[in-house]
Image (cartoon, rainbow, N blue to C red):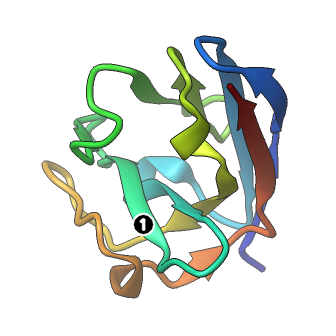
Amino acid sequence: QVQLMESGGGSVQAGGSLRLSCRASGYSVMTYCMGWFRQAPGTEREGIAVISEGGNPGYADSVNGRFTISKDNGKNTVYLQMNSLKPEDTAMYYCARGPSRYWACPLTARDFGYWGQGTQVTVSS
């Protein structure tokens, strides 16, 4: 059974950092695209970072240069390091499993079929 469990959310002041973790079970993160998405109230779910089977990352323009996605295959865990946080980064953050792609992954939510329950990130000014 595929399960994804996020952790690491919280409240932080603008300019601060957080690291989110997503522990996967029921399959290996080595064999699928993994992604981080976020959704603020009243908005659509936004893809912000993905990592391919081969470890190649992709980022939305809104977070490029500030966020870093990585994975530890041995721990079957994907991470999102978030630096220079802004109030507009406030949202529920979700981890998701996407298609099997070695080189590059999509950033669109419809391409991801399994989702975690989410973890809240709040950035105050």
Q: Count the marks: how many?
A: 1
Q: Nearer the viewer, residue 55 or 111?
A: 111
The residue at 81%/69% (across/down) is 117
Q: Nearer the viewer, residue 123 or 22?
A: 123
Instruction: Say which quadrant the N terminus sits in.
Output: bottom right
Mark 1 neighbour class, 10 Å CA radius: few under 14, some 14 to 19, many 20 or more? some
Instruction: Say which quadrant the C terminus sits in.
Output: top right
Dividing the picture into quadrants, the one containing residue 17 is top right
Left or right relative to 96: residue 7: right
Dividing the picture into quadrants, the one containing residue 34 is bottom left
The residue at 13%/48% (across/down) is 103
The residue at 66%/12% (across/down) is 16
Element carrying mark 1: strand
Left or right relative to 52: residue 38: right
Q: Can residue 75 be seen from the camera position used here?
A: no
Residue found at the far left of this picture: 103
Relative to 60, residue 114 above or below: below
The residue at 66%/41% (across/down) is 76
Left or right relative to 30: residue 22: right
Dividing the picture into quadrants, the one containing residue 2 is bottom right
Q: Can residue 88 be seen from the camera position used here?
A: yes
Give amino acid for label 1. Answer: Glu
Question: Which residue does the numbered mark 1 point to in the structure image?
Answer: 46
Q: Nearer the viewer, residue 64 or 124?
A: 124
Q: Looking at the picture, how far across and down is residue 72, in whole percent?
A: 57, 27
Q: Looking at the picture, how far across and down is residue 102, in whole percent?
A: 20, 52
Residue found at the far front of this picture: 125
Q: Looking at the picture, how far across and down is residue 116, in whole percent?
A: 73, 68
Relative to 51, residue 39 above or below: below
